[in-house]
Amino acid sequence: MKNTIITLAGLISLASFSTFSHADDFKKDGAENGVYVGANYGYLKVDGEDDFDDDNDVLQGLVGYRFNNYLALEGSYIDFGHYGNNLSSAKTDGYTAGLKVTLPIADRVELYAKGGQLWYSTDYDVVGFSGNKDDEGVFAGAGVAFKVTERFLINAEYNWYDAEINLDNVSNGSDTETDFKQASIGVEYRF
């Protein structure tokens, strides 16, 4: 996983350098507002008061609408993957909806922050007791995006998701505070 991130970071650097060397070809074409789609791949740290602490890959698909250069509404589907050990394991996936605030700091570079609501479902198996729990939480994140063209961007971001995993059949249905911490790189295309 670490080699993949290093390789992808090198590709981002190369793409950024090659687009900066062709600055005359870079033209604004009206992608200031409208629909965009994207995907992220990265590293997930599951951190909590339970036996599910683990490191994992995370996949995320997203769609959003930019109202202007500064504000967007964004939704996503996230596969947090499998985590745990032989005695206790879980798989979580979910959906988000939130606001994304962007600050263009150069022609080709944008900083952004986002936050909102997470709805998630966890399938778990703890010492032979299994179940499924649907719940909701909040999330917040920040990142930087590099414009390869006015419509195609490469980004790096960090997101934090607050989750309570309720194990209905285990430990008298106790809740365990769990944080999902996601560091990822991705792409975005603006229509």
Image (tube, helix red, strand yellow):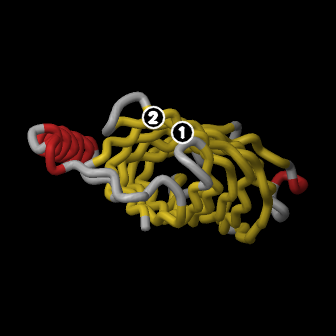
Residue 10 visible? The answer is no
As displayed, is residue 116 above or below residue 140? below
Q: Residue at x 71, y 70 (%)?
A: 130
Specify the quadrant that holds the C terminus. bottom left
The residue where tag 2 is placed is 104
Q: Give me the C-alpha separation between circle 1 and circle 2.
A: 6 Å
Q: Where residue 25 sits in the image (x, y, percent)?
A: 15, 50
Task: Name the amino acid type tagged 2.
Answer: Pro
The residue where tag 1 is placed is 102
Q: Between residues 23 and 128, which one lies in front from this camera angle?
A: 23
Task: Name the amino acid type tagged 1.
Answer: Thr
Q: Where residue 1 sits in the image (x, y, percent)?
A: 28, 48
As displayed, is residue 117 above or below residue 120? above
Q: Residue at x 77, y 44 (%)?
A: 176
Q: Where residue 31 sits in the image (x, y, percent)?
A: 43, 58
Question: Could you classify mark 2 by the number of other residues whose Cα lies within 10 Å: few (under 14), some (14-19), or many (20 or more)?
Answer: some
Q: Where residue 158 sits in the image (x, y, percent)?
A: 49, 38
Q: Between residues 31 and 113, which one lies in front from this camera angle?
A: 31
- Assign a secondary structure to mark 2: strand
Q: Residue at x 53, y 63 (%)?
A: 34
Q: Are marks 1 and 2 in contact (CB under 8 Å)?
A: yes
Q: Residue at x 40, y 46 (%)?
A: 184
Determine the residue located farthest toward the right in the rendered image: 172
Identify the mark at residue 84; answer none if there is no mark: none
Residue 94 visible? The answer is yes
179 to the left or right of 26:
right
